């Protein structure tokens, strides 16, 4: 049995929340993860047949600007992805400091501004600024094996994920879960102990 799950915060606020101007802008954030219970695999990027990445590519559509960079790499290389197969391949092979951008013409300086801080966190202020410009961003999130994906968007995407999960294979179950109900590691990995915990959020 394979599990694909999308946790969402709709809406949320990023950046300088003390700013009156910032408080008027709402952002949308999600986390797509996956696991294979029979195979003992936990990580969306290495799910068999790239099913989770294919779903995310369907939601994102495109074209997508992609910067594939790993920790310690200084140079920035940007490529424009327009083909679904190329987007899926990029999603499964993202480096630790990679980023995908939709809805903006990127620059090397912009990609640098999105590099993680010393504590490993992204620049929330930079992300918020891009969301305000109607840009959608995708970052890799380290999983037990491979990686999952964080998605930041200027619009809610939970319904798009529900639609994308409507035709999952018989051996796969999909969930779209409000993040507020899934705080804590035990609930995030609910399928390991109680697969019915979020039955009301399963896409059938």
Image (cartoon, helix red, strand yellow):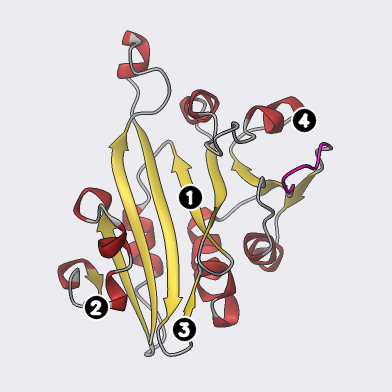
Q: Do the residues labelled 3 and 2 touch (CB within 8 Å)?
A: no
Q: Judge depth for marks 3 and 2 and give the one in front.
A: 3
Return the disc, 2 or 1, that comes first in the chain's sequence.
Answer: 1
The Cα–Cα distance between marks 3 and 2, rounded to whole angstroms, is 15 Å
Q: Judge depth for marks 2 and 1 and give the one in front.
A: 2
Q: Judge depth for marks 4 and 2 and give the one in front.
A: 2
The Cα–Cα distance between marks 4 and 3, rounded to whole angstroms, is 39 Å
Q: What stretch is highlighted in magenta?
A: 69-74
Q: Do the residues labelled 4 and 3 touch (CB within 8 Å)?
A: no
Q: Are marks 2 and 1 in contact (CB under 8 Å)?
A: no
Q: Judge depth for marks 4 and 3 and give the one in front.
A: 3
Residue hosting label 4 = 108
Q: How crowded is mark 1: few (under 14 residues within 10 Å), some or many (20 or more)?
A: some
Residue hosting label 1 = 150
User: At which x and y percent is residue 68?
Assistant: 73, 50
The Cα–Cα distance between marks 4 and 1, rounded to whole angstroms, is 21 Å
Return the disc, 4 or 1, that comes first in the chain's sequence.
Answer: 4
The Cα–Cα distance between marks 2 and 1, rounded to whole angstroms, is 22 Å
Identify the element where label 2 is drawn. Answer: loop
In the picture provided, is 145 more to the left or to the right than 95?
left
Find residue 40 and name its label. Answer: 3
User: At which x and y percent is residue 201?
Assistant: 21, 66
Q: Residue at x 51, y 55 (%)?
A: 149
How many dots with numbers? 4
Q: Which residue is drawn at 37% across and 40% down?
A: 28
Q: How crowded is mark 4: few (under 14 residues within 10 Å), some or many (20 or more)?
A: few
Residue hosting label 2 = 195
Please check the rendered image and state whether residue 119 is part of the magenta-colored stretch, yes or no: no
Identify the element where label 4 is drawn. Answer: helix
């Amino acid at each position: 049995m394979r599990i694909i799950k999308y946790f969402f915060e709709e809406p949320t606020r990023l950046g300088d929340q003390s700013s009156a101007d910032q408080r008027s802008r709402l952002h949308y954030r999600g986390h797509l993860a996956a696991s294979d219970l029979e195979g003992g695999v936990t990580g969306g990027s290495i799910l068999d047949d790239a099913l989770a990445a294919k779903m995310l590519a369907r939601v994102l559509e495109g074209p997508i600007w992609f910067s594939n960079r790993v920790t310690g790499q200084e140079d920035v290389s940007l490529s424009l992805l327009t083909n679904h197969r190329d987007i899926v391949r990029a999603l499964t092979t993202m480096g630790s400091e990679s980023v995908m951008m939709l809805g903006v013409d990127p620059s090397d300086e912009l990609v640098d501004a999105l590099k993680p801080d010393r504590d490993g966190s992204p620049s929330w202020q930079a992300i918020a600024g891009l969301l305000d410009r109607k840009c959608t961003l995708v970052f890799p999130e380290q999983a037990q094996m491979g990686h999952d994906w964080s998605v930041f968007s200027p619009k809610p995407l939970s319904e798009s994920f529900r639609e994308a999960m409507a035709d999952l294979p018989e051996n796969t179950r999909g969930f779209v879960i409000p993040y507020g109900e899934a705080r804590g590691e035990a609930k995030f990995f609910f399928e390991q102990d109680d697969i019915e915990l979020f039955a009301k959020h399963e896409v059938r």
